[in-house]
Image: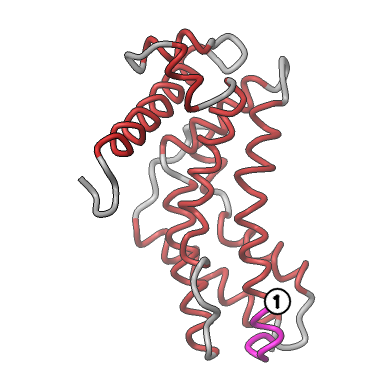
Amino acid sequence: MQPGKDKSEEEAMSKREAILAAAGEVFFKRGYEAATTLDIATKAKTSKRALYQHFPSKEAILSELIRSRSRQMQAPVEIPPPKSRSAFFETLRTFGIVFLSQLLQPNTIALYRLAISEAGRSGQVGHELKLSGQGPVVEAVRHLLEHGAEQGYLRRVDIDIALDAFFHVLIGPLQIGLLLRTEKQPSRSTLRSRTDRALAVLERLSA
């Protein structure tokens, strides 16, 4: 049991996580529109009533799936602002590697494939990916770049251009290759290489 949590809290958290895991499997297998809360509850070995105690709707489950993935991707920039130029770029380097590893995980790629497959019927998955997935991550990096500009770690740089360039170079062809199944899961060294390229672009933009 985790410190500060009683047994009932642990059980509730465990049930919530089981529902989310089950929802991911059901969404990927049946499609978001076709999936029902009964399907999810059955997969999670619980009741619809218990499911609704944690999530008011199928949409809420989807949103939490995507938000949890987003939190993992932006975690490295959710720290006190760096107090030196070297610390600033090291924070970005750590972010880049963690972000890519989470973005390119099979479960995340499956979410994007789900959004693509559902696009003709509903834009819900794509909308949530943009709102709750990409949005918070991009804004977290934007705030970090703004802090770097204010402190002089980045010089003569347009934040919007820097942000676009950073993510464009960071992701490169990796995501689309996995979506199309034309590329294998990238190695850790590949993630570091993409991150170093993205940082080099930022440094050139601010030279």
Residue at 62% x, 66% y is 141
Q: Quadrant of the N terminus?
A: top left
Residues shaded magenta: 147-154
Task: Give the secondary structure at mark 1.
Answer: helix
Residue at 67% x, 50% y is 135
x and y percent of residue 80 in the render? 51, 77
Q: Is residue 6 left or right of residue 109?
A: left
What's the amino acid at mark 1? Glu
Residue beneath disc 1: 146
Instruction: Between residue 117 and residue 58, name the one nearer to us.
Output: 58
Instruction: Between residue 120 and residue 148, name the one nearer to us.
Output: 148
x and y percent of residue 189 in the render? 35, 62
Is 16 part of what is drawn in magenta?
no
Instruction: Between residue 42 and residue 35, name the one nearer to us.
Output: 42
Q: Is residue 198 shown above or below 101?
A: below
Q: Within the image, what quadrant is residue 31 found in? A: top right
Q: Quadrant of the C terminus?
A: bottom right
Residue reaching furthest left? 1
Q: Within the image, what quadrant is residue 127 found in? A: top right
x and y percent of residue 175 in the render? 54, 44
Q: How many labels does the image show?
A: 1
